[in-house]
Image (cartoon, coloured by chain):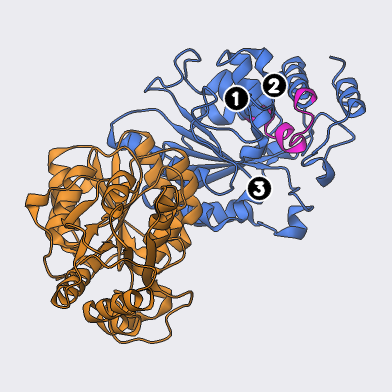
């Protein structure tokens, strides 16, 4: 772990709290959802969309856009609130989450949600697709980049490492693999279920330039992403140390809050209270 | 047939800059001419089918038309989820050239046999499943593959298969080819089974049983219009496929005919619900499972004899 992540995480600022309230709005509408898994990557997604990536909300297929794939599709609320915030679709749509005719399902679908590059949900699919996209960009002499956010549990999948080998072989410096390392997967701690440590060493062994960062420190994330590529001849792996359920003290670090098939009114009230109100 | 398919990728690549080739650790020297001419569109990746299919999806999302080649079950068994989610759900024009369709790899054992591939691929929404009968027909298929909108599973046969197709009958993806007008019996076959079925029909003709032949190179989407039309007047439909009977061509034909008003009797000839337990060659396995022309003819004769009370013989 580097020095940057050893210090205390700064408190969530007004924008992070606002985005979390939007997540709760969707959870309230849908009555269910992956809560902890959507809150841990929120600052990663925020910084990419606020400060790093180029895109046009009203022209989601703009050819020169940076590509963003949320490979951990179950964390879709983090992406949905960001896309709504940026105007890819109306914010009111969030309240339809998981409803029969909604465009916003429990996992994101390309073709339904403007701004969603690939339908994800089955784990271990995003990075291979991102590799293909990054190769395509190189072949087409385009300078856009491909960002792929994965869960830590997701990296248990062999396909992630097949793709990592391939990305390293092709020296895809336009590819950025980001891991939301909240250290809790569905059943429990990643250390118990399947320990991926030494995580940075693994990525480096697969020919990535790898670094870790506090995944809730907006300033640090911004500084790091602005310095990409980490190595002009290698893909980058950014291991983001995060907290599952970040922002909800009663949910933080708890596997029980990975997914709730029923979110009660009481849960909603408690979440808003923790975030300083509606 | 495999050589034709692979060589055609190079030809298509010359015509269309969107065409890329991806192999999964294939034999040395494959498509060397394309590698030399278009190195940026030639990828020889490792033994990693999940990534290989997923990255092809990424390439297709960006406008390329990937042609992939590896051994059939390594597509259909190993990378099934990638095929379903990355290719079919996203409706991408990726073409899987699947070596060793059916029993081609008989000497290599059941890990290498593609017995349920057509059933598995046929179950996937948006997928197109094709098994042509010989090299010239493969050429016609590959020509059309360039503009076909869906992901395609293209089953390759052994190579050196007897040429039984006729360019005069034409070829269109998704359209069956009526090789012989129906009589009492209508054979419906796919892939290289056409050659065996022609033999069977010739043998049956000697005993005055006139048999039509419908070559269904495209199993999905099935040409149900033509099938219904030509099956309407026959007493017995016989499906013949180099794959397990559950879920394959025979199942597709049964499903289609069951929706009609006058369903003929259907005899499905194919592999049983088991992993083949012997080696040998594709030809010896045809013999084991009754897929050779004379065996097919005998099965049909027995069927006609055992059902003579219920089947009106008009030949």
Frontmost residue, B149 versus B118: B118
**Image quadrant containing the N terminus of chain B:** bottom left
Magenta stretch: residue A34 in it? yes
Q: Which chain contains the residue that carries disc 1?
A: A
Q: Residue B168 at what x, y percent from top left?
A: 7, 50
Q: Is residue A58 visible?
A: yes
Residue A210 position in % (x across, y down): 55, 45
Q: Which chain is blue?
A: A
Q: Confirm whether the magenta stretch covers residue A179.
A: no
Magenta-colored span: A28-44
Residue at 23% of width from left, 57% of height from top?
B214
Q: Quadrant of residue B248?
A: bottom left
Label 3, secondary structure: give it.
loop
CB-based contact (under 8 Å), mark 1 and mark 3? no
Residue named by callout 1: A103
- Residue sitting nearer the eye, A236 or A18: A18
Query: Which one is closest to the eye, mark 1 or mark 3?
Result: 1
Q: Residue at x 87, y 15 (%)?
A: A277
Residue linked to disc 3: A152
């Amino acid at each position: 772990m580097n020095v940057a992540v050893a210090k205390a995480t700064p408190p969530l600022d007004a924008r992070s709290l606002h985005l979390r309230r939007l997540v709760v709005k969707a959870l309230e509408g849908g009555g269910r959802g992956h809560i902890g898994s959507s809150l841990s990557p929120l600052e990663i997604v925020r910084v990419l969309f606020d400060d790093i990536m180029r895109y046009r909300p009203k022209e989601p297929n703009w050819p020169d856009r940076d590509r963003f794939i949320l490979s951990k599709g179950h964390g879709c609320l983090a992406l949905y609130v960001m896309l709504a915030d940026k105007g890819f679709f109306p914010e009111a749509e969030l309240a339809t989450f998981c409803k029969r005719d909604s465009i916003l399902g429990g996992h994101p679908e390309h073709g339904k949600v403007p701004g969603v590059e690939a339908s994800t949900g089955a784990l271990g699919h995003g990075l291979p697709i991102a590799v293909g996209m990054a190769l395509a960009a190189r072949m087409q002499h385009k300078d856009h980049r491909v960002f792929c956010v994965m869960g830590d549990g997701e990296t248990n999948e062999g396909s992630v490492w097949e793709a990592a080998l391939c990305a390293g072989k092709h020296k895809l410096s336009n590819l950025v693999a980001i891991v939301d390392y909240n250290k809790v997967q569905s059943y429990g701690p990643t250390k118990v279920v399947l320990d991926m440590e030494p995580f940075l060493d693994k990525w480096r062994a697969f020919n990535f330039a790898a670094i870790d960062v506090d995944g809730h420190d907006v300033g640090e994330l911004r500084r790091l992403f602005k310095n990409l590529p980490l190595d002009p001849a290698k893909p980058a792996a950014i291991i983001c140390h995060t907290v599952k359920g970040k922002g909800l003290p009663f949910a933080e670090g708890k596997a029980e809050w990975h997914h709730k098939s029923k979110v009660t009114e009481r849960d909603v009230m408690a979440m808003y209270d923790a975030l300083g109100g509606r | 047939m495999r050589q034709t398919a692979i060589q055609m990728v190079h030809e298509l690549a010359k015509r269309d800059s969107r065409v890329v080739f991806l192999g999964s650790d294939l034999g040395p020297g494959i498509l060397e001419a394309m590698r030399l001419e278009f190195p940026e569109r030639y990828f020889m990746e490792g033994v990693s089918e999940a990534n290989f299919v997923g990255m092809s999806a990424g390439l297709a999302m960006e406008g390329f038309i990937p042609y992939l080649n590896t051994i059939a079950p390594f597509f259909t068994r190993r990378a099934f989820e990638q095929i379903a989610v990355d290719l079919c759900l996203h409706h991408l024009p990726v073409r899987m050239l699947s070596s060793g369709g059916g029993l081609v790899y008989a000497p290599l054992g059941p890990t290498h046999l593609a017995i349920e591939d057509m059933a598995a691929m046929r179950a996937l929404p948006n997928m197109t499943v094709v098994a042509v009968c010989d090299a010239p027909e493969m050429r016609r298929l590959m020509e059309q593959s360039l503009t076909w909108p869906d992901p395609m599973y293209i089953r390759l046969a052994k190579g050196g298969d007897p040429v039984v197709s006729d360019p005069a009958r034409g070829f269109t993806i998704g359209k069956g080819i009526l090789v012989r007008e129906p009589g009492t019996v209508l054979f419906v076959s796919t892939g290289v089974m056409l050659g065996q079925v022609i033999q069977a029909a010739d043998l049956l003709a000697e005993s005055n049983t006139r048999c039509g032949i419908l070559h269904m190179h495209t199993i999905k989407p099935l040409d149900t219009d033509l099938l219904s039309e030509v099956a309407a007047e026959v007493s017995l439909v016989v499906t013949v496929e180099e794959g397990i009977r559950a879920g394959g061509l025979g199942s597709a034909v049964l499903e289609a005919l069951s929706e009609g008003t006058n369903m003929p009797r259907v005899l499905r000839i194919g592999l049983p619900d088991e992993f083949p337990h012997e080696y040998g060659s594709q030809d010896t396995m045809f013999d084991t499972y009754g897929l050779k022309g004379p065996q097919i003819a005998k099965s049909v004769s027995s069927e006609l004899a055992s059902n003579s009370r219920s089947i009106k013989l008009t030949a």
